[in-house]
Image (tube, helix red, strand yellow):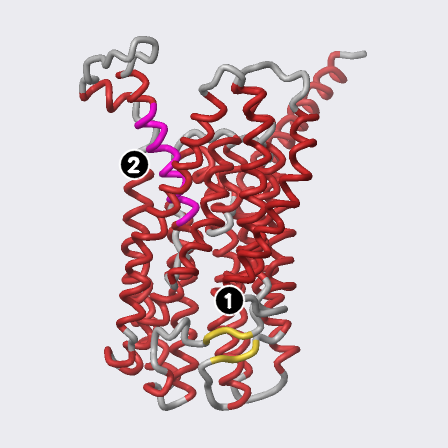
């Protein structure tokens, strides 16, 4: 081969290398635009579905815009709220991120489509008085403002890495639009006071219950000589409690579209499920524990499958209940645009529910991993036992809150459970350092610097999340009022 040919081959190799490098760089740069592009396509499809299925009318363009913003809200719910269900399982390594996203997408959609409420309060649980808004056009734009503001706020919270309550975002949006449209007198302040109380009650109750179960596991299994033997005794009991709690939770909250079940009947269903689960779980746990070493790492294996099951059930219940946050205002707009009037409660058309269900799944798939990592691993370190306590506390707390008649947020409960587990670990670790278990002699209290070094809950995340919780309703309300004023100036 001549020198001239060698030179040509070298030049060609360099050119190919440059092209390969350029392709790699292009792919790397375009990667952040893939998810927004897919999201944009979904929103366009939601608008087309509204244009086709709603029919012709003077308010057709309003319904199309509402469908787009309803899809946008649903995606934000998937990106933010679903992390509470899947984060602990991923953080405990019981599920991979891919597995969590797939399971959550399936069960969220199933919950929304199979058990989602077919009747939703258009004014979000009595926040505003519908009679205070006289014109249907004002009502439509008030609901539109509530939808846009709540979606924007949840999107902002996701961007900064704060899991917030989408329910409270919608409540704030409806309240702000209602005040802007009809004044302060239109708001039911007693209901708002109850919701404000739930900001404190939900996370504290969830944290206390999660910490209590973790303390039980440590006392009865982790810090005993015969860990495997005690696990065979207590893990079936814990599985039975979980199954009973979820059965009661789903009977009471998840299947309200199919059948109305009161609290007493729900608890009886939970009791039967607990007994059956115990009888099934006991031989399974005994078989699974055979040959395991007598150490904590072996015990964690026994909690893996129950944790995955609990995450799936939480997702199903979340889809059944929280899809209304996305499509409730949209359903109200569709009803008002179609009939020229508004009602306290309306039926949700199937196409509206499909937008909500698919929007949650798309939001979870495209943008959910960030918050899943936050809840699962960045607040405090979770293992299957700790994550199991978080999931169990979520179901039990909702049942207790329903019995007390308190509106609660699944976000606040789940994240409160993570905080409860983390703070209990801090307290327990410090106690073990101070207490000499062999002699019962108490050691000297740790220095402040040593105490700070051993903190097991990241204070920066804790403060960010709590601050986001506190300002969610007023921020969504203020944003909604501004959007309503803008919309009313242009369209009313």
Magenta segment includes 418:
yes
Q: Which residues are magenta?
A: 413-428
Pick whichever, 441 or 388, lies toward us: 441
Asked whether, in this view, residue 35 is left or right of residue 481, the answer is right
Residue beneath label 1, please?
324
Pick whichever, 33 or 255, lies toward us: 255
Pick whichever, 381 or 400, lies toward us: 400
| Residue 133 spot, x, y in % from top left | 35, 86
| Residue 135 spot, x, y in % from top left | 39, 90
The N terminus, quarter of image: top right
Name the residue at 47% across, 22% down: 222
Q: Is residue 45 visible?
A: no
Badge 2 marks a residue whose secondary structure is helix
Residue 123 is labelled as: none
Q: Is residue 117 above or below residue 226?
A: below
Magenta segment includes 423:
yes
Name the residue at 52% across, 19% down: 296
Q: Label 1: few (<14), some or many (≥20) within 10 Å?
A: many
Q: Is residue 25 visible?
A: yes
Asked whether, in this view, residue 304 is left or right of residue 422, the answer is right
Residue beneath label 2, please?
460
Q: Main secondary structure of the magenta part?
A: helix
Mark positioned earlier in the residue sequence (2 or 1):
1
- The label nearer to you, 2 versus 1, is 1
């Amino acid at each position: 081969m001549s020198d001239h040919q060698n030179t040509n081959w070298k030049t060609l190799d360099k050119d190919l290398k440059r092209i390969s490098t350029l392709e790699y760089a292009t792919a790397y740069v375009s990667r952040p635009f893939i998810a927004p592009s897919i999201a944009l396509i979904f929103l366009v499809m939601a608008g087309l579905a509204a244009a086709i299925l709603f029919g012709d009318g003077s308010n057709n363009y309003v319904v199309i815009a509402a469908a787009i913003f309803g899809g946008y809200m649903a995606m934000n719910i998937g990106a933010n709220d679903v992390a509470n269900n899947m984060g602990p399982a991923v953080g405990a390594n019981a599920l991979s991120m891919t597995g969590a996203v797939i399971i959550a997408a399936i069960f969220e959609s199933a919950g929304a489509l199979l058990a989602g409420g077919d009747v939703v309060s258009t004014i979000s649980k009595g926040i505003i008085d519908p009679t205070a808004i006289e014109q249907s056009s004002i009502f439509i734009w008030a609901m539109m403002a509530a939808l846009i503001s709540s979606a924007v706020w949840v999107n902002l919270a996701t961007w900064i890495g704060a899991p917030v309550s989408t329910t409270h975002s919608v409540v704030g949006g409806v309240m702000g639009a209602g005040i802007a449209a009809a004044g302060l007198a239109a708001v039911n302040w007693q209901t708002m006071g109850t919701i404000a109380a739930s900001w404190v009650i939900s996370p504290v109750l969830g944290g206390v219950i999660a910490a209590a179960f973790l303390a039980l596991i440590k006392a009865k299994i982790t810090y005993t000589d015969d860990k495997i033997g005690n696990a065979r005794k207590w893990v079936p009991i814990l599985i039975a409690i979980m199954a009973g709690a979820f059965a009661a939770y789903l009977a009471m909250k998840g299947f309200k579209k199919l059948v109305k079940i009161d609290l007493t009947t729900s608890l009886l269903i939970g009791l039967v499920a607990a007994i059956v689960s115990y009888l099934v779980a006991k031989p399974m746990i005994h078989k699974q524990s055979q040959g395991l070493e007598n150490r904590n790492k072996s015990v964690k294996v026994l909690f893996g499958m129950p944790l995955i099951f609990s995450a799936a059930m939480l997702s199903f219940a979340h889809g059944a209940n929280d899809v209304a946050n996305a499509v409730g205002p949209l359903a109200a707009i569709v009803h008002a645009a179609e009939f020229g009037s508004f009602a306290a409660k309306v039926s949700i058309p199937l196409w509206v529910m499909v937008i909500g269900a698919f929007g949650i799944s798309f939001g979870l798939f495209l943008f959910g991993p960030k918050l899943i990592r936050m809840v699962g691993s960045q607040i405090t370190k979770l293992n299957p036992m700790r994550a199991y306590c978080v999931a169990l506390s979520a179901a039990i707390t909702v049942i207790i809150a329903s019995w007390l008649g308190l509106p609660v947020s699944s976000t606040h409960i789940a994240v409160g459970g993570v905080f409860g587990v983390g703070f209990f670990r801090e307290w327990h670790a410090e106690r073990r350092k101070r207490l000499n278990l062999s002699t019962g002699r108490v050691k000297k209290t740790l220095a402040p610097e040593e105490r700070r070094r051993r903190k097991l809950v990241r204070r920066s995340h804790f403060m960010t999340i709590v601050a986001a919780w506190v300002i969610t309703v007023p921020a969504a309300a203020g944003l909604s009022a501004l959007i309503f004023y803008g919309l009313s100036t242009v369209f009313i």
